[in-house]
Amino acid sequence: MTTLVLVRHAKSDWGSPSRDDHDRPLNARGLRDAPALAARVAERDLRLGAIIASTAVRARTTAEFFGAALGLKPELDADLYGAPASALLAAATNRGLDAVMVVAHDPGMTVLAERLSGGEIGHMPTCAVATFRWTTDDWDVATATDPDEWDFDSP
């Protein structure tokens, strides 16, 4: 079984216009939503091989909540910051693991989730989680076919 979990970073703080986009932290809602969604994902007994996250503070912090709930240390990948859907998918497949979580940004997250869900996921709001599963153990086959099942959760 091949599993891809997409997590859009939790809600960030736009309060300081002088702050660089990369350095925006989570706001109060994001700090509430990220651990709550991470706990819900942990209840699903996913056996992830890795959590990879954008280096942006808001994505990194979101990934840390998921990592704590799932017992994994997130790996940071600078190429995920502002990455298009194709790069998000490639980051997961290049790990060579059966199950990977990617924590990153829009618009790439929404584009990829929409594509993999056959258009049923129209938008990935902040801290949304979309999980896609294929019965194959081969990422090349998985990425060339529709998922066998998927689910979606958001705050």
Image (cartoon, rainbow, N blue to C red):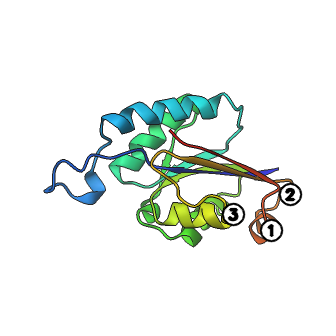
Q: What residue lies at 45% left-to-right and 48% top-to-bottom?
A: 126
Disc number placed over residue 67 in the picture, else none: none
Q: Looking at the image, which is closer to me, 11 or 62?
A: 11
- Can you identify the residue that label 2 sits on? 136
Disc number placed over residue 145 in the picture, else none: 1
Q: Position of residue 44 (x, y in %)?
A: 70, 32
Identified by mark 1, the residue type is Thr
Q: Residues within 10 Å of mark 1 (few under 14, many from 20)?
A: few
Q: Say above or below: 59 vs 37.
A: below
Q: What residue lies at 51% left-to-right and 43% top-to-bottom?
A: 74
Q: Position of residue 73 (x, y in %)?
A: 52, 38
Mark 3 or mark 2: name the one nearer the start of the chain: 3
Q: Residues within 10 Å of mark 3 (few under 14, many from 20)?
A: many
- Can you identify the residue that label 3 sits on? 116
For the residue labelled by badge 3, is the local secondary structure a helix, a strand or a loop? helix
Mark 3 or mark 1: name the one nearer the start of the chain: 3
Identified by mark 2, the residue type is Thr
Q: What residue lies at 38% left-to-right and 39% top-to-bottom?
A: 30
For the residue labelled by badge 1, is the local secondary structure a helix, a strand or a loop? loop
Q: Find the distance from the CA under tag 3 to the CA under tag 1.
A: 9 Å
Q: Is residue 145 left or right of residue 96?
A: right
Identified by mark 3, the residue type is Leu
Q: Are marks 3 and 1 in contact (CB under 8 Å)?
A: no
Observer-side mark, 3 or 2, equals: 3
